[in-house]
Image (cartoon, grey):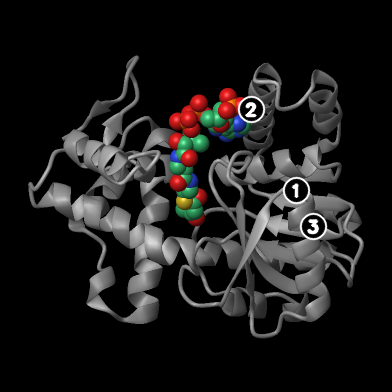
Amino acid sequence: MDIRKVGVIGAGQMGNGIAHVCALAGYDVLLHDVTRERIEAGLATINGNMTRQVASGRITEAQRDAALDRIGAAVNLDAFEATDLVIESASENEAIKRKIFADLCPHLRADALIATNTSSISITRLAASTDRPEKFIGVHFMNPVPVMELVELVRGIATDDDTFDSVRIMAKSLGKKVANAEDFPAFIVNRILLPMINEAVYVLYEGVGSVESIDKAMRLGANHPMGPLQLADFIGLDTCLSIMQVLHDGLSDSKYRPCPLLVKYVEAGWLGRKTQRGFYDYRGEKPVPTR
Ligand code: CAA
C-alpha cells in the first residue's frame, strides 16, 4: 500500500501531534473530531507547535506553511473515503473506540488501512470490531509526538504482512524509530512506565514524600527529564488510570492495582495539564503542588 492521504480521528494532544508529524513529512491529512471547535483547537495547537519549531530553527517558515496547507478539517467521516490510512487517536476508552470504528468502516475504501494509537487496549480485540482485522494495526506514538522519537508497532493476531510493512515504512518516513511489541496489555513502554507512575502516586499516598520531593528525587536521582507526577499530569491522569485498569484487568495481578489517590484525582476531574489541575495546579504563573 502506497500511503499518501492519512485520516486522523481525535484532535487532542496525541491526535494533533500525529497530524502535525504526518503533514510535515508530506502526507495529506484530514483531521476529525466530534465538533468543529475541537478540530479548530487542534489546528491552533499544531500551528503553535510548528511555530515553536520555526523559532528554534528545526523547520523553515515555508515548511510550516506547506504542512499547515496539507491539513484539512473533516467534520464528517464521509471525507475519509479518500484516505489510505486512518489513525484513530480518540480517548483511551474501548467503547468509544469501537463506536468510532463502526461509524468509520462504511466510509473507507476496501483496501484502506486502520491504525489505532491506543496506549494499552488489545489490538486483536479492537481489530475484531472492524470489517478488516487483517488491515488493522497498533501504532503507538509518544507524547509530545513532534519531539519523541519512538513509535511502538503492535500487530493483532490477524494483521497481515502488507499492513505491517506499509505502516512500518510510513512511521519511519515520519522520522520515527520503530520498536515492535507483541499484543499484550499496555505493550512495552506503558507496561513499564505506568506502574512506575502508579508507584509514585502510592509513595505520595503513603506519605513517603511530597509531590515536589518525589519529582525532584526521580529527576535528579534517576536523570528522568520529568518527575513521575509531572509526567502523569502531562499524559493525563484519566489516561494513566485507564492504562492501569487495562493492566490490572488484563494480567490479573494485584501489583497493577491503581492507587486510590489516582482514582480520587480522576473522580475530582483533576486530570492534569489539560484541566489545569492534577498533582500540580497550573492556573497561576508557576505550577504549584496540590498536596
Ligand atoms: N511540539 C513541538 N515541539 C515541542 C513540543 C511540541 N508539543 N514540546 C516540546 N517541544 C520542543 C521545544 O520547542 C524544544 O525544542 P528545541 O530543543 O528545538 O528548542 C524541545 O522540544 C524541548 O522542550 P522544552 O525546552 O520546552 O522543555 P524540555 O527540555 O523540558 O523538554 C520534553 C520537554 C521533551 C517534554 C521533556 O520534558 C521530556 O522528554 N519529557 C518526558 C516525556 C515523556 O516521557 N513522554 C512519554 C510519555 S508516555 C507516552 O506518551 C505514552 C502513553 O501512551 C502514555
Can you tell which of label 2 and label 3 is closer to the viewer? 3
Q: Mark 1 sits on what residue?
A: 174
Mark 2 is surrounded, within 10 Å at the Cα level, by few (under 14), some (14 to 19) or many (20 or more) other residues, namely some
Question: Element under label 3?
Answer: helix
Residue type for callout 1: Leu
* Relative horizontal placement of residue 146, taking residue 132 as reference (left or right): left
Q: Mark 2 sits on what residue?
A: 49
Residue type for callout 2: Asn
Whether the residue carrying mark 3 lies under 8 Å from ligand 1 is answered with no
Which x, y percent locates residue 273? 40, 34
Does the image show residue 136?
yes
Q: Is residue 165 above or below residue 83?
A: below
Q: Mark 3 sits on what residue?
A: 170
Going 17% across and 37% down the picture, which residue do you hit? Answer: 213
Which x, y percent locates residue 187? 50, 69
Whether the residue carrying mark 2 lies under 8 Å from ligand 1 is answered with yes
Give the CA separation, mark 2 to mark 3: 22 Å
**Which sits in the foreground, 28 or 90?**
28
